[in-house]
Image (cartoon, grey):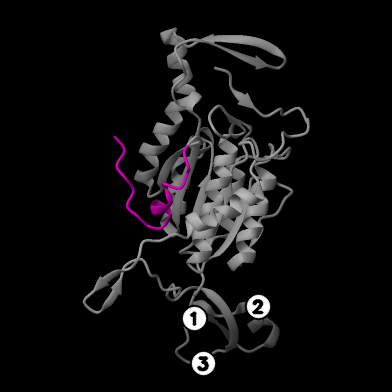
Amino acid sequence: MSARSRDEGGNRPPPSGDGIAPTLAELIALKALAQRRPPARRGRHGPAGPAQSHLRGRGMEYAESREYVAGDDVRHIDWRLTARSGRTHTKLFQAERERLTLIVADTAPSLYFGTRVRFKSVQAARAGALAAWAAVAEGDRVAILRGSLREPPVRPASGMRGALRVLDALVRWYRQPPADDAGLSVALDHAGRLLRPGSRLLVLADPRSVTGVPAMRWSALAAHHTVLVAMPTDALEREPPQALLPFAVAGERIELDMADPRQRQAWLAAFERPVQDALAQLPRRGVRAVALPAESEGHEWLPLFNGAAQPQVA
């Protein structure tokens, strides 16, 4: 068995549509799958079930400022306007009617690899597209960002416009490794500045990127937001054959003997253990987590995204 991996030396990426790079048409086609819902159950007083209200309750969306009157909450004083006008003003807030669904795309080079059906990067793009379509169907605004010190986040938008912006970013970022990838921690820094309380956060990441983030950081995110981490995995990484595997590294051929127990143990420690550690530890931090085999259709995790309970990990 030989692994397929993308050339990171600046060569032109392989043509799209073969599981090596995501295509816009492929991601658009996932809309029907993401927005397919079971019919509402019939209750005593009418339908009951998956229908959701777009009203998220009282949020902290700024509306306007007006002059302070007795009884206003002093915590909401608009100090800047007060200083400019010489009269005390207070901020008014309106109900948050559109939740933000933010997608964080890890672009670590280890994602641009695959041996079955598609690259892990393509599976990440598919998961992001499914999330975007599901979110806009629920009335959410959607946005996406990656760990970059140069490229800003894709700004939140609702409806078809918001979904297509996200899909365009997924195609660009997962076609080949961006040269300026700054890591998942930087991406989460950007996310912290964009998220509002009550937002929904989907993190698409290589398992080793996930385990490199301090545990307390996941806890802090989960304290104010609904967080799901989706980790694409490859069959060769999960269960290598007990055989001699040839690889090309920096122009040289090397062979790894996967029948050697020590070599096999080292392999699984590098690739499979981070997956299992994340699946076990993240739910304890209030974060939902799921592994996405690259060879699967990749939509089985959607109930978790829509609020289903986290399954127990053995």
Residue named by callout 2? 80
Gap in Å between the C-alphas at discs 2 and 3? 17 Å
Residue named by callout 3? 69
Q: What element carries label 1?
A: helix
Q: Which of marks 2 and 3 is nearer the N terminus?
A: 3
The type of residue carrying mark 1 is Val
**Residue 142 horizontal/vertical position (percent):** 57, 61
Q: Which of marks 1 and 2 is nearer the N terminus?
A: 1
Q: What span is in magenta? A: 296-314
The type of residue carrying mark 2 is Arg
Q: Is mark 2 on a helix, strand or loop?
A: helix
**Residue 258 horizontal/vertical position (percent):** 47, 11
Main SS, magenta region, reads loop
Of the pair 251 and 288, the residue shown nearer to us: 251
Q: Is mark 3 on a helix, strand or loop?
A: loop
Label placed on residue 74: 1
Q: Which of marks 3 and 1 is nearer the N terminus?
A: 3
Q: In which quarter of the image is the C terminus?
A: top left
Tell me: residue 129, above or below residue 87. Answer: above
**Residue 166 horizontal/vertical position (percent):** 62, 56
Q: Residue at x 49, y 59 (%)?
A: 134
